[in-house]
Amino acid sequence: CEYIEQNVERTLTLDELAGRAHLSPAYLQRLFKSVVGVSPKQYADACRLRMLKSELRNSTDVAQAV
């Protein structure tokens, strides 16, 4: 989760995440979902959405926030 949050601006692949965790992609997917409740992609999407909402609240320009 921490790695995904630190790299929220990048598109992380399941293979990349699995390699960092020294797990197979399928096992990482199952393990992540069982612990966090969502897939790694869904978690990354939620992090990006949270970041966008924060930027929109703190910015006067929508284009700048995006």
Image: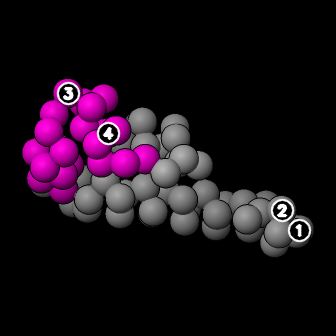
Which residue in the protein does label 4 denote? 17
Q: How far apart are the alpha carbons under marks 3 and 4?
A: 9 Å
Q: Main secondary structure of the magenta part?
A: helix
Q: How far apart are the alpha carbons under marks 4 and 2?
A: 29 Å
Write down the region rendered in magenta: 12-33
Taking the image as shown, residue 62 lies to the left or right of residue 2, namely right
Which residue in the protein does label 2 denote? 64
- Check disc 2: other Cα within 10 Å, few if <14, some if 14-19, many if 20+: few
Which residue in the protein does label 1 denote? 60
Could you tell me if residue 19 is visible in this image? yes
Going 19% across and 45% down the picture, which residue do you hit? 25
Instruction: Give amino acid for label 2.
Output: Gln
Q: Nearer the viewer, mark 1 or mark 4?
A: 4
Q: Are marks 2 and 1 in contact (CB under 8 Å)?
A: yes
Q: How far apart are the alpha carbons under marks 2 and 3?
A: 37 Å
- Check disc 3: other Cα within 10 Å, few if <14, some if 14-19, many if 20+: few
Could you tell me if residue 59 is visible in this image? no
Instruction: Give amino acid for label 3.
Output: His
**Image mark for residue 22:** 3
Instruction: Give amino acid for label 4.
Output: Leu
